[in-house]
Image (cartoon, rainbow, N blue to C red):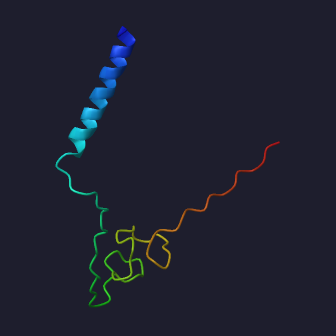
Amino acid sequence: MTGLNRHFKASLALTLLAGLAATTGCTAWQPRVAEEIPAQVCTGNGDTDMDGITDCNDRCPNTLRGQAVDAEGCPLPEVMEPKPFRG
């Protein structure tokens, strides 16, 4: 055997052994089941961040005071003024 052929066979054997070592001890592959999130129980109309959206419906609970928010309580994107054309 030449050196290159021997190196190729050794690399192939090592790769196969590593693959077998990684799969031993494992049972059949099973997909992960999404964790169920319990429904939020709301009692009252609290609004801790004072954005006008009750805490039960607020998807972004820590908005800054006075910041414009959408119907879900998340900040609205800032409107950028276009730069004047200088041509």
Q: Residue at x 28, y 57 (%)?
A: 29
Q: Residue at x 83, y 42 (%)?
A: 87
Q: Quadrant of residue 60?
A: bottom left
Q: Quadrant of residue 7?
A: top left
Across the whole image, how many numbered discs are drawn on residues?
A: 0
In the picture, measured across the screen, residue 41 lies left or right of residue 64, that is: left
Q: In this view, which residue lies farthest toward the right?
A: 87
42 is higher (above) or lower (below) than 83: below
14 is higher (above) or lower (below) than 50: above
Q: In this view, which residue lies farthest toward the top?
A: 2
82 is higher (above) or lower (below) than 20: below
Q: Nearer the viewer, residue 9 or 70?
A: 9
Q: Nearer the viewer, residue 59 or 37?
A: 37
Q: In this view, which residue lies farthest toward the front?
A: 1
Q: Residue at x 29, y 27 (%)?
A: 13
Place of residue 53 in the rendered image (x, y in percent of width and height, measured from the top left): 41, 81
23 is higher (above) or lower (below) than 51: above
Q: Nearer the viewer, residue 11 or 74?
A: 11
Place of residue 43 in the rendered image (x, y in percent of width and height, measured from the top left): 26, 90
Quarter placement of the N terminus: top left
Q: Nearer the viewer, residue 64 or 34?
A: 34
Place of residue 61 in the rendered image (x, y in percent of width and height, measured from the top left): 35, 72
Q: In this view, which residue lies farthest toward the bottom?
A: 44
